[in-house]
């Protein structure tokens, strides 16, 4: 079963539990899904536990009586036995962000190049990529994510209506910084070397970047 299918089956089984068993079991679910446990192992364990609870429920035994322990303590014990996903290190994190930004950049470059060729425009203009632009995109993406993350984290600690305002502020900051990055890259693009990259090569680079991301997230 896929993770989505297991979660759907889990929801179906929960509806068959008594209110007391459901509350107890849902506390375990929250703990498991907030953990770094492997998603497949996590959902398999929860699904198996749901079947066990329903089985003893028919005999008049509650989930608490079955496990003989509080939900939080039971969760900690069982999560420790599962494979955990290693969180990204700072180095991996700061490589991942520009990787994503550059992958998107080269994909957009390929689209613009192909459209330019289709319209019989000046292909050399569409195929030119400035080294400075790449540096600004890579560095700017990190600064942008850091700025937005800090704003969102600060907003989560305040009241609900303040959080909405800060979320809107984060979007505005994102747009402003993005425009500034584009303007800097265009204005000072001649300071460092400019390369001519054919659209098919830009597309190939973006595909390689995407495959790298898929491998990374599959491992996580």
Image (spheres, helix red, strand yellow):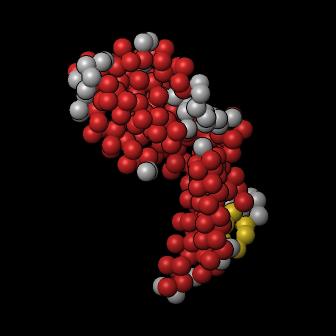
Q: Is residue 90 left or right of residue 180?
A: right
Q: Residue furthest front?
A: 59
Locate residue 64: give its quadrant: top left
Instruction: Please provide percent x and percent y for residue 131.
Output: 72, 60
Is residue 51 visible in the rendered image? The answer is yes
Residue 11 screen position, x and y as percent:
30, 38
| Residue located 30% across and 18% down the image | 61
In percent of width and height, residue 31 lies at 45, 24
Q: Residue 52 occupies which quadrant of the picture?
A: top left
Q: Residue furthest right?
A: 193
| Above or below 126: residue 213 | above
Horizontally, is 26 left or right of 35 in the view? left
Q: Is residue 38 left or right of residue 128?
A: left
The x and y percentages for residue 160 are: 31, 23
Q: Is residue 78 above or below residue 115?
A: above
The residue sitting at 49% across, 14% down in the picture is: 73
Q: Quadrant of the C terminus?
A: top right
Residue in the image at 61% along x and 35% along y = 83
Return the residue nearer the eye: 183 or 93. 93
Q: Is residue 34 above or below residue 179?
A: above
Measuring 32% from the left and 30% from the top, which residue is drawn there?
Answer: 55
């Amino acid at each position: 079963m896929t993770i989505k299918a297991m979660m759907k089956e889990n929801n179906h089984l929960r509806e068959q539990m008594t209110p007391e068993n459901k509350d107890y079991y849902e506390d375990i679910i929250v703990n498991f899904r907030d953990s770094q446990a492997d998603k497949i192992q996590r959902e398999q364990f929860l699904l198996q536990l749901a079947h066990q609870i329903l089985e003893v429920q028919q005999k008049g035994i509650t989930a608490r009586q079955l496990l003989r322990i509080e939900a939080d303590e039971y969760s900690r014990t069982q999560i420790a036995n599962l494979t955990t996903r290693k969180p990204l290190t700072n180095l991996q994190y700061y490589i991942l962000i520009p990787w994503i930004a550059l992958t998107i950049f080269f994909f957009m470059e390929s689209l613009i190049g192909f459209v330019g060729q289709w319209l019989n425009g000046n292909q050399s203009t569409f195929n030119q990529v400035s080294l400075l632009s790449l540096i600004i995109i890579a560095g700017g993406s990190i600064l942008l994510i850091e700025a937005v993350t800090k704003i969102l984290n600060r907003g989560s600690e305040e009241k609900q209506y303040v959080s909405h305002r800060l979320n809107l502020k984060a979007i505005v900051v994102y747009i402003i910084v993005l425009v500034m990055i584009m303007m800097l890259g265009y204005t000072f693009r001649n300071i460092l070397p400019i390369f001519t990259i054919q659209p098919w090569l830009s597309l190939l680079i973006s595909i390689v970047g995407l495959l790298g991301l898929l491998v990374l997230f599959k491992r996580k």
